Amino acid sequence: MKVFLVFLALCIVNVNFIVFQGDMSNYLHLQNLMKAAAEECAAGAGLYYDEEAYGEGKMVISEKHAEAYIDSVCENILSESGLPAGSDLSWELMIHDDRTGREEGVRGPSVEVKLTLDTEDLFRLSFLKVTRVVRSAKYELADWG
């Protein structure tokens, strides 16, 4: 009977370990997806500049176009990535350019995007609860004087 109880205990521990490894793999995949999406949003949004201000020698990011681009990227991620139903992807956009002022120590205009994914619990084990994934990325136009 003692051998059976030890075997049962080891079996339960191993099953929990296997479940944790699978859930952690899915979590890391989601982290990488969010990282790539944040980088895509920041880089794409930084390329929409105001042409009139550019003609005057200023680099001003077009906030309206940048927001529309980020919205389209986020919609594609929600529809194409296979996220659980009911997941909510929100974003924040911070622009530092000639209109809003540049950050200290940054040579050129920059765009920072922070993505927040709220979803159901990503781990099946009862003692782990992760329902939010946050990633951010910053794109700097360093060649602009």
Image (spheres, rainbow, N blue to C red):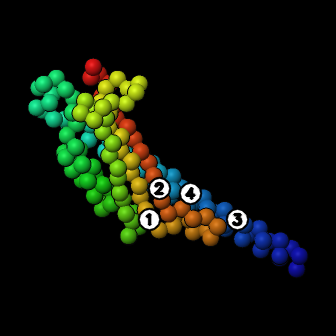
- Quadrant of residue 129 within the rendered picture: bottom right
Q: Residue at x 26, y 23 (%)?
A: 144
Q: Is residue 40 above or below residue 10?
A: above
Check the picture and name the quadrant holding the N terminus.
bottom right
Q: Secondary structure at mark 3?
A: helix
Label whose residue precedes the other's in the sequence (2 or 1):
1
Provide residue 101's location: percent of width, then percent of height: 30, 32
Q: Residue at x 61, y 68 (%)?
A: 125
Give the Cα separation between the discs numbered 2 and 3: 27 Å
| Residue that badge 2 annotates | 133
Looking at the rendered structure, the kind of residue marked 1 is: Thr
Give the Cα separation between the discs numbered 4 and 3: 15 Å
Label whose residue precedes the other's in the sequence (3 or 1):
3
Looking at the rendered structure, the kind of residue marked 2 is: Val
Q: Secondary structure at mark 4?
A: helix
Looking at the rendered structure, the kind of residue marked 4 is: Met
Numbered badge on residue 14 = 3
- Quadrant of residue 44 within the rendered picture: top left
Give the Cα separation between the discs numbered 2 and 4: 13 Å
Numbered badge on residue 119 = 1
| Residue that badge 4 annotates | 24
Residue 131 visible in the snapshot? yes
- From the viewer's perspective, is the residue at label 4 or at label 3 nearer? 4
